[in-house]
Image (cartoon, rainbow, N blue to C red):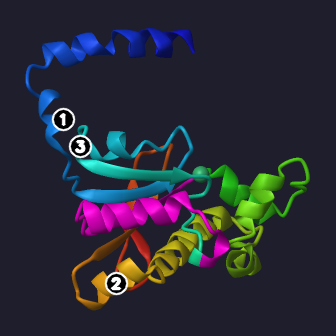
Amino acid sequence: MQTLLDHARSFHRQVADAGDTYRHLAEGQSPQALVISCSDSRVVPAHITGARPGQIFELRNAGNIVPPRWAADVSGEVATVEYALEVLGIRDVVVCGHSHCGAMSALASGGDLSLLPGVEAWLSLVRPALAPRATEEDGALERLVQLNVVHQLATLGTYPVVRRLLDADDLRLHGWYYRVDTGVLHELGDDGTFAAR
Ligand code: ZN
């Protein structure tokens, strides 16, 4: 932690050396995309996309899950999506799953989560849709992660703001599967499969 803290404390020097680059950020933001990804430390959307501050709006949680709107009276996910689309005018939304995902592994294994009631409740949002599709076969976790991405895109489509923009052909949804060990990005195509492009 100390290295991270030292960097954060001295970061302002980099900002000062960057001239007007950061000063312009105070004038507002117009990010090109909303990226919904896992909280996993190995998946860093800005790192993968090469985005600079101000270029992507991020929403991160365990398993890159888009909760159904009925799931909670208060939802950071719902609020973030609404703000991104209605206020910032973002018109590209990415749901990015990844290899070696702990949340999806937990879902696939069906293991005991009694010590993690929050995780259990969170995964219960997708368990009915995904657990029946989970198997022990080779490549099963990869397929489960990809199915999860497709499922989250579908849930996103039930948010009123998303539905309205999709109906107006004014929003693009993207499904990604990112390999943390190779850096290869697999994109969801019109045929419903993920492939490196
Ligand atoms: Zn993950």
Quadrant location of the N terminus in the rendered image: top right
> Can you tell which mark lies on residue 54?
3
Residue lying at 90% horizontally and 56% vertically, measured from the top left? 112
Residue 92 highlighted magenta (yes or no) = yes
Cα gap from disc 2 to disc 1, whole angstroms: 39 Å
* Residue 7 horizontal/vertical position (percent): 40, 13
> Looking at the picture, which amino acid does disc 1 mark?
Ala
Cα gap from disc 2 to disc 3, whole angstroms: 29 Å
- 139 shown above or below 41: below
Q: Residue furthest bottom?
A: 167
> Can you tell which mark lies on residue 190?
2
Tag 2, which secondary structure?
Answer: loop
Asked if labels 1 and 3 touch by Cβ distance under 8 angstroms, the answer is no
* Residue 159 horizontal/vertical position (percent): 46, 79
> Callout 2 environment at 10 Å: few (<14), some (14 to 19), or many (20+)?
few
> Callout 1 environment at 10 Å: few (<14), some (14 to 19), or many (20+)?
few
> Can you tell which mark lies on residue 26?
1
Q: Which residues are magenta?
A: 70-99
